[in-house]
Amino acid sequence: MPQPSNAHVRISPPRKRLGVRHLQACLMALVSFVAYALRANLSVAVVAMVRTRPRNQTALAAALLNETSLLNGSVVGLAGEGMGGDVEADDMMFDWDEKVRGGLLSAFFWGYMISQVPGGILSQQLGGSRLLAGALITTSLCTLLLPVCALQGGWKAVFANRVLQGFTQGPVYPSVYTLLGVWVPPHEREIFTTVVLGSQLLGPMLASPLCGVIAARWGWPSIFYSFGVLGLATGVLLLSLGADRPSKHSRISAEELAYIESCINDGEAPKMQPRTPWLAVISSPCVWVLWLSLSVQAMVFFTFLTSIPTYLNGVLGFSLEENGLLTSLPYLTGFLSSFFFTWMANWIRDRKLLSTTNSRKLFNAMANVPISVCVVATAYVSSKAASVALICLSMGFYGPSFVGVQANYLDLAPLHTGPIYSVGNMMAAVLGVLGPQVVGLIVSDVTDITQWRIVFWAQATVLLTVLMLYTWLGSGKEQPWNHPDYNHKRKRNLNIQEELGPVSLQAVPLQGSRTSLSASPEDKIVANAHIVANKT
């Protein structure tokens, strides 16, 4: 295995354009795609599993868009009337009503929220690659067992299975961010972040039609078998070709290893993974405003996409078939636009037109402002075509966030990205689940345009308010507590201070000076500061 370089100067990129770091990015992108496909497959499979079509067609359309925020019935309400789990062996169809289906589609995120922070901490201590592979393999095994759970235990067993899937998938994105922090040089973060995180949009976009074809030909259990096997294969591939950090990869060249380590932490690769300085983290305004920005973006994004089908059906008269456009088009728009805005961010960086801080703030504004406009405008158009266009535009302007706030984690603390991201992602999951519930409280009549305008104006207001906070407090600079020796140096400084006692500073003039601080320029007096320790 190549030995890391001890140089503290920036080394030029390797002559080979593609290296092991690009392989790691492709592996993480594949994991991101598979993870979202595993998350979304039940949304489509449930259509083939139930005996009758749901009375509330738009609730199912919302589920197909994103199961994150479909909570039409609370988990407690699953014990209500008509929620049986009986199944006939001949056709394997279930008599699950809308509350059961809504609870099953939301079950994933109850487990997902719980494991975010523990997953972030473990990704840092155990290694992102191994934890990422383990999380994906465990989720895939649960997916393979879901048909057995449904046939033998009914909706209760399926609910428990989905909660477990969410719990095991919680460490996935904290691990991805941990790996990005140690593998990606600063000037390559925009394109790597976009490729890896943008792939998650392909999951629900491709899973919906694929699940439909698989269910039609081989039955709904084949959906879970197919995606379960895909997840297992991806996990094994990651175990074979992935590594927790560049110095641990057996196939990386000495040239590429020296290049990566010279770009990250000023060439000072830590001998062991340092502990996250949580006190310093939670005391940083730039971290709090980053958590808030991403959480609000996620809440508005998921709430808007999942409430729009109901709005189009109730106000504009869209049918379920017409709502099907929303299953793929917005995700495709967001995926394609993310690469355009990544090119723009790289163009600005290469020409040094903006600092990293101002670049992150610019692209955050390019996301929040147009999304706010599109969200509000949707409530004032009567054309179906215009409504679909605005929905796609809103998702398209989600693209700048990949090179804005989502890449900002890597700027602040590459060594601690996983644990810090896990807190923000947990907040985003909580708000993403609660958002549709707030919509349900405001909109009592889905045909009342006035109630919908309150919802959309509220979303835009929250987005713009958070944008102002991020513009004020956000930062793209690496924080001092990211240094590998931060905890050690802080402890050493505290020990020195305890030994010296209270410290006072006195300005003492150099030889030949008349006064210490008030000398005139003609006298050319230079003051020399001496620390005088007064022990108490």
Image (cartoon, rainbow, N blue to C red):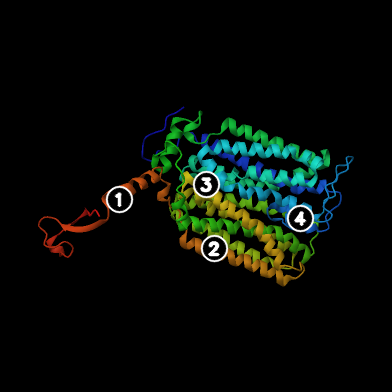
Q: Earlier in the sequence, mark 1 or mark 4?
A: 4
Up-down relation of residue 227 to residue 506 (above or below): above
Instruction: Tell me the residue that label 4 is attached to.
Output: 61
Q: Earlier in the sequence, mark 4 or mark 3?
A: 4
> Given this view, does label 4 or label 3 mark the residue nearer the observer?
3
Picture quadrant where residue 268 is located: top left
Q: Earlier in the sequence, mark 1 or mark 2?
A: 2
Instruction: Tell me the residue that label 2 is attached to.
Output: 466
- On the image, the x and y values in percent for residue 111 come to 65, 48
> Given this view, does label 3 or label 2 mark the residue nearer the observer?
3
**Front-most of 335 and 140?**
140
Q: Earlier in the sequence, mark 1 or mark 3?
A: 3
Task: Say few, some or many: other residues with alpha carbon within 10 Å of mark 1 (under 14 / 14 to 19 / 20 or more).
Answer: few
- On the image, the x and y values in percent for residue 188 come to 49, 44
Residue with the most extreme top position: 1
* Residue 40 visible (yes or no): yes
Q: Is residue 327 left or right of residue 9?
A: right
Instruction: Tell me the residue that label 1 is attached to.
Output: 497
Task: Say few, some or many: other residues with alpha carbon within 10 Å of mark 4 (under 14 / 14 to 19 / 20 or more).
Answer: many
Name which residue lies at 16% across and 61% down: 516
Q: Where does the C terminus fall, quadrant-wise?
A: bottom left
Residue with the most extreme right position: 90
- On the image, the x and y values in percent for residue 9 come to 36, 40
Mark 4–mark 3 Cα distance, whole angstroms, equals: 34 Å
Task: Say few, some or many: other residues with alpha carbon within 10 Å of mark 3 (under 14 / 14 to 19 / 20 or more).
Answer: many
* Residue 195 visible (yes or no): no
Mark 3–mark 2 Cα distance, whole angstroms, equals: 22 Å
Mark 1–mark 4 Cα distance, whole angstroms, equals: 63 Å
Instruction: Tell me the residue that label 3 is attached to.
Output: 419
